[in-house]
Amino acid sequence: MRDLIKVFKALSDPNRVRILKMLEVRPLCVCEITAILELAPSTVSKHLSLLRDVNFILDEKDGKWVNYELNKTQNNEFATRLLPLLADWLPDDEIIQSDREKVATVDRNHVCSV
Amino acid sequence: MRDLIKVFKALSDPNRVRILKMLEVRPLCVCEITAILELAPSTVSKHLSLLRDVNFILDEKDGKWVNYELNKTQNNEFATRLLPLLADWLPDDEIIQSDREKVATVDRNHVCSV
DNA sequence: CCTATATTTCGCCATATAACGAAATGAAAA
DNA sequence: TTTTCATTTCGTTATATGGCGAAATATAGG
């Protein structure tokens, strides 16, 4: 029960849903996500660690960056069944569409503290 | 987006999940649910109206009682796809099992303010 | 009509949550 | 080694949420 509640709480915040919908396009580092959401880096980091705690995303170190990607492994029943639902939803949401366009063009070398 | 967030928030409380898992067994009135959850009637009523707002359950007046049941109509994409997932989950949860045993035996004529 | 019962609404309180900035950490570059 | 940049951790603050009891509403039955 405890784990299930954590999973739904993770999905109960619009900024975390925006992150997941961005990661459907491609993996992103923290500062790219921060630039698109226009939130403080510490806030974004907290959202990401929460999504990682419920196995929705995986992190991978890449030099000074940390890349986050959707967890496509089958190691978590909740993620395995909920992420495909989310992928079907919000196709016409304006914020989601705008975020995804930015994902297509954002470049971490230009966007992070220049 | 707004509606989706409301849906996940509705699922983010253990007492609301318990209610949905009880309603998988059969429809129940407010005082039966109140007796099983051991919460104040006003609290249960609030949970139920929240679940109704996101189309997870339907209410039907029956004399002085109000019966709530799972919404099995196909009129809401989120309910249609999330309720079957929930039905697959928590089969071994002790609280859920205990709640469901009580659902099988509870009688509104005995349990409500006698 | 009057009372009893089921439910809902309202106001209040304690806790949870999301936001920020400052400071700490870790790795690359100078 | 020192500096720089990306990220995380920590402490604080404002708002959201879940709980209750009291009062309002609705219906059944005397």
Image (cartoon, coloured by chain):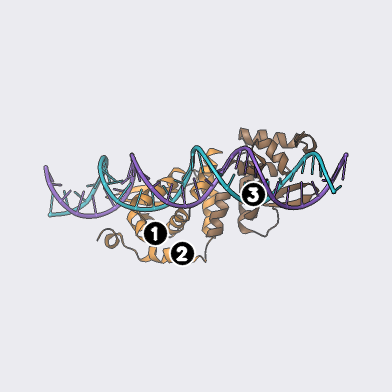
Chain colours: A brown, B orange, C purple, D cyan
**Secondary structure category for the residue under label 2:** helix
**Secondary structure category for the residue under label 1:** helix
- The label number, if any, that marks residue A84 in the structure image: 3
Q: Position of residue B64 (x, y in %)?
A: 27, 50
Q: Earlier in the sequence, mark 2 or mark 1?
A: 1
Q: Chain of mark 1?
A: B
Q: Which residue is mark 1?
A: B37
Q: Which residue is mark 2?
A: B95
Question: Can the viewer see residue B70 in this picture?
Answer: no
Q: Quadrant of the C terminus of chain B?
A: bottom left
Residue at mark 3 to residue at mark 1: CA–CA distance: 33 Å
On the same chain, marks 3 and 2? The answer is no
Q: Residue at x 63, y 55 (%)?
A: A53
- The label number, if any, that marks residue A94 in the structure image: none
From the viewer's perspective, tell me whether residue C24 is left or right of residue B103: right
Amino acid tagged 3: Pro
